[in-house]
Amino acid sequence: MAQKKNNEEEKLTRLNKFISNAGVTARRKADELIFTGRVTVNMQTVTEPGTKVNPEKDVVKVDGEKVKPQSEFIYVVLFKPRGYVTTTHDEKGRPTVMDLIGLNTRLYPIGRLDYDTDGVLLLTNDGEFSNMMMHPRHKVFKTYFAKLDKPIEEPDMKKLREGIIIDGRPTSRAKVRIIPNTADQNIWISIHEGRNRQVRRMLETLGYIVQRLKRVEYARIGLDGLKPGEWRYLSEEELANARKLATPKQPVFRKPESEGAPPADKKGKKGGKKKKKKDKKKKEQLADSPPQPASDSDVLESISKELENISEQIQDTKE
């Protein structure tokens, strides 16, 4: 009897997780659906995301439509062009990224890209994977190419690395690097948060106008030769690496110094301190540099071609 009860409990899952895993929408959006009374369980309205349900027995509906467990997960990377809205439906009638995906399966974008921003956009019907990629605690970085209206100064680079105040609260530390041979006006910048128009707003706060913004990588997944508007399925290797990036790292503990070890002389101590300072500085420099795009040479070549007639391509940065 106890064994049967344990088996039943193992089948239970949180309501928001069930809706997300079923491919209806991302976890945060699922919470909103539940809070606003649009979800029922066995004909009863439920407003608590943590409510436990049994996917095999309970009938869950969103806006009166039954939610079915997802049988097959799909993972896609799209080269989103500028002029497309990152949503499944737009009330203003503007073209959406879904217009570019010709699949019968419902997919949802992982995060957003602004109307005037192009580049890597991931889509899936796997709500759990989407949550792993987007949640700030997993620190999955997204790397952007940004062309600025003027050369970026070192003090401003430092501010980006320390965090910029937006809407009254600081952003997480960004990773920034100037792209060589571009007059210090073009940078790589990596962030793991997903605030609205975050990269543009961080740079605008420091007095820079972003003339061109392109996401070149998300969880080390790049465009890999895709043209604007084209998409492809993620490879098993890309998917595995993305999951690995989102997996919390185990803390590393230093082994205690062995008892009875002879004390270091003054020169040794002084030299040791210098070495520690150098190592610390080196680690900080590496930490502040954004991860290299998966196809760095291809991206640089693509960007250098764009820069030849960038003045013709620059659009109004205001959305």
Image: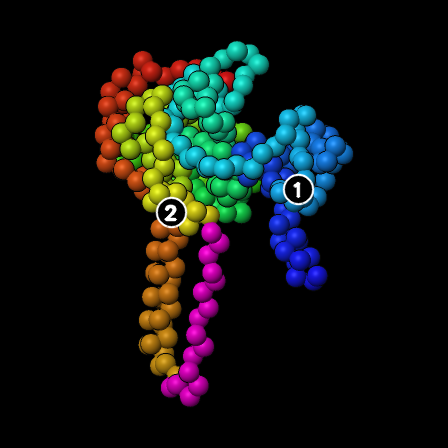
Q: Position of residue 194 (x, y in %)?
A: 51, 35
- How crowded pointer 2 is (Cα within 10 Å; few <14, some 14-19, many 20+) is rated as some
User: Gap between marks 1 and 2, in whole Å?
Assistant: 35 Å
Determine if the magenta segment contains residue 260: yes
Residue 252 appears in the figure: yes
Residue position for label 2:
241
Q: Position of residue 58 (x, y in %)?
A: 68, 40
Q: Position of residue 252 (x, y in %)?
A: 45, 65
Question: Residue 190 appears in which quarter of the rendering?
Answer: top left
Q: Residue furthest front?
A: 1
Residue type, numbered disc 1: Lys
Residue 258 vertical placement versus 89 (above, below): below
Query: Which image quarter is the N terminus in?
Result: bottom right
Camera-nearest residue between 89 and 70:
70
Label 1 residue SS: loop
Residue position for label 1:
57
**Magenta-highlighted residues:** 247-262
Residue 3 vertical placement versus 260 (above, below): above
In the displayed structure image, the side of residue 47 where residue 20 appears, left or right: left
Asked if marks 1 and 2 touch (Cβ < 8 Å), the reply is no
Residue 3 vertical placement versus 310 (above, below): below
Residue type, numbered disc 2: Asn
Residue 275 vertical placement versus 263 (above, below): above
Q: Residue furthest bottom?
A: 260
Question: Residue 210 appears in which quarter of the rendering?
Answer: top left
Mark nearer the N terminus (1 vs 2): 1
Please tell me which residue is depicted at 27% across the width and 23% down the height of the picture. Answer: 307
Camera-nearest residue between 264 and 298:
298
Camera-nearest residue between 3 and 294:
3
Label 2 residue SS: helix
How is the model colour-coded? rainbow
